[in-house]
Image (spheres, rainbow, N blue to C red):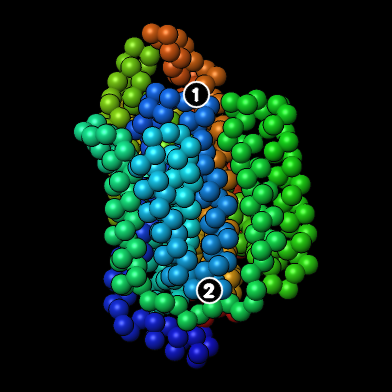
Amino acid sequence: MAPGDEDSRRRLSRPTPQGAIVAVLAIAGLASSFMFTLVVPIQSKLPELLNASREDTAWVVTSTLVAAAVITPISGRLGDMYGKRRIVLILLGALVAGSVIAAVSPGIVGIIVGRTLQGAVVGVIPLGISILRDVLHEDRIDSAIALISATLGVGGALGLPLSALITERSDWHVLFWVSAALGVVVFALVLWIVPASVLRTAGRFDYVGAAGLAVGLVGVLLAVSRGNEWGWTSAPVLALGLGGVAVLLVWGWWELRLDEPLLDLRVAARRPVLLTNLASIGMGFALFGSNVVYPQMLELPVATGGFGLTLLGASLVVMPAGVVMMVLSPFSGRLARTVGPKLLLVLGAIALVVAYAYTLAFSDAIWQLVVANLLIGVGIGFGFAAMPMLIMRSVPQSETGASNGLNALFRSLGTSTAAAVIGAVLATYTVQMDGMPVPTPTAFTLSFVLGGAAAVIALVVALFIPRRAAGERHPSLPG
C-alpha cells in the first residue's frame, strides 16, 4: 500500500467509528434493495387501482429494473470522479423524490416516473462497497463487503412481508410514503456518519459513453423484459434487442478509443473480472427466479397444487433466506480471507444448485420450501459476498466504483432475464380456474430446472476464475 493511500484511509476513518459507517451503508443497502419488492403486494391489482391495462402497469416493475441497470454503472463512475458519498446522497434524493411523486400520483404516468427514480437508488450498494475500500482498515474490508452485499437479498426478503402488511392494513399509497420516509432517514444518516472521500479519479466525464451505454442497455433490457408480452419475434422486440446490441458494440469501440472512458473495458476484460461478471448473470437469475416462483407456489389455491397462503404468509416462508444472508455475512468475510473469495463463490453456486435440486425432489410441504429457501439464502449470501471481493482484488482503486457498478449491471441482466423467462414459463403452462389462468405443476417444475441450470452455469464459470493465494491482491492495489 502506498503511504499516501494509508494516510488517506486514516484521515477518513478517524472522525467516525468504522462500525457506524458500515452500519449506515448496510441500512442504505437494505433501503435500496427494498425497492424491488415494494409493489409486489399490489402488482396483480395495479390494472384496477390505476385504471390501466395490464401491459401498461407492467411498466411499474420494468421501469425500476431498467433504471437500476442503466444508472448503476454510470453512478459508479461518477462516484470515482466526484466523490462516492456525494453520488450516494444524490441517489437517495432521487429515491425520496420518486417516492413522493408516486405517493401523490393518482394515475399510471406518475407511478412509472416515481418507480424509475426509485430504481436509480440501487446504485447505492456498489458505491457503498467502494466506500468501504476507501475508509476501512484492510482487516475489516471483507466482512464489511459481505454484509453490504447481503443487503441485495436481505432487503427484498425482509421488505416483502412489510409491504404485504402495509397493503393489508392501509391504502396502497402508504407504501410510497414509507419509502420516502425511509429515504429521508437514510439520507440524514449518510450525511452525518459517512465521511466524504478524498480519493478521486481525475479526468472528464464521458457523456457520450454514458448516453451510448444508456441507449444500448434500455434497448436490450426492454426487449428481454417485454418479449413475453409483445412476442419474441415481433418487430418492436427485434428492433429494440438488435438495435440495443448494435449500439453497445459501437459504444464498446468508442470506449476503447478514449483515454478517459466511462468504463475501462480493458480492466473489465481481465479474466477474473470478466468471469466474475459472467457468473453474476447466473447468480442474479437464480435469485430472482426464486423470488418469483416460491411465492407464487405458496399462494396458489390448494386445488391447483399450491398451498393457499396469503401474500403475507408466503412472504414469511421466504423471509428466512434473507435472515440467513445477514447472519452469514461476518462468516463470509472471515472465510474469504482464509480460503479466498473464489471458493466462496463456488460454495454459493453449489448451495443454489442443491436448493433447486432439493425443491425438485421435495416440495410437498411448506417446511420443505422453508428448507429450500434457507439453502437459497446460503447460496446468495456466499455468492453475492464473493463477487465484489473478486472485483476489487482485480481492479485499481481508481476503478472500484465503476467496476462494482458494472458487476451490479451484470446481476441486473440476470434478474431481468429471469423475470422474462420465468414469467413466460408460468404464463405458458396454465389451467383455467374460476376464469383465471393459474400455473400448472409443470410450470413450476420447469422454472426450478431453469433456476438450477443458471446456478450450474454460475458454478462452472466460477471454477475457471483464477485463484490467488489468500490475502494476495492486484499489484496496483493497496495491501
Residue 135 seen:
yes
Seen in the picture, residue 451 relative to 347 is either above or below; the reply is above
Amino acid at pointer 2: Tyr
Q: Residue at x 31, y 21 (%)?
A: 307
The one of 139 and 319 positioned closer to us in this rendering: 319
Q: Position of residue 64 (x, y in %)?
A: 49, 44
409 left or right, relative to 235? left
Residue at disc 1, secondary structure: loop
Mark nearer the N terminus (1 vs 2): 1
How far from the left and from the top, in percent, is residue 127? 47, 64
Which of the pair 374/251 is nearer the observer?
251
Q: Is residue 455 in sight in this rendering?
A: no
Mark 2 closeness class: few <14, some 14–19, many ≥20 residues within 10 Å: some
The residue most toward the left is 169
Q: Residue at x 52, y 29 (%)?
A: 56
Q: Amino acid at mark 1?
A: Ser
330 vs 214, nearest the viewer: 214
Res 82 label: 2
Image vertical order of residue 260 relative to residue 379, above or below: below
**Quadrant of res 318:** top left
**From mark 1 to mark 2, how far is it between C-alphas?**
42 Å
Return the mark for residue 298: none
Number of on-image labels: 2
Q: Where residue 314 appears, x then y in whole percent?
A: 30, 31
Q: Helix, strand or loop at disc 2? A: helix
Query: What residue would you read off at disc 1?
Result: 53
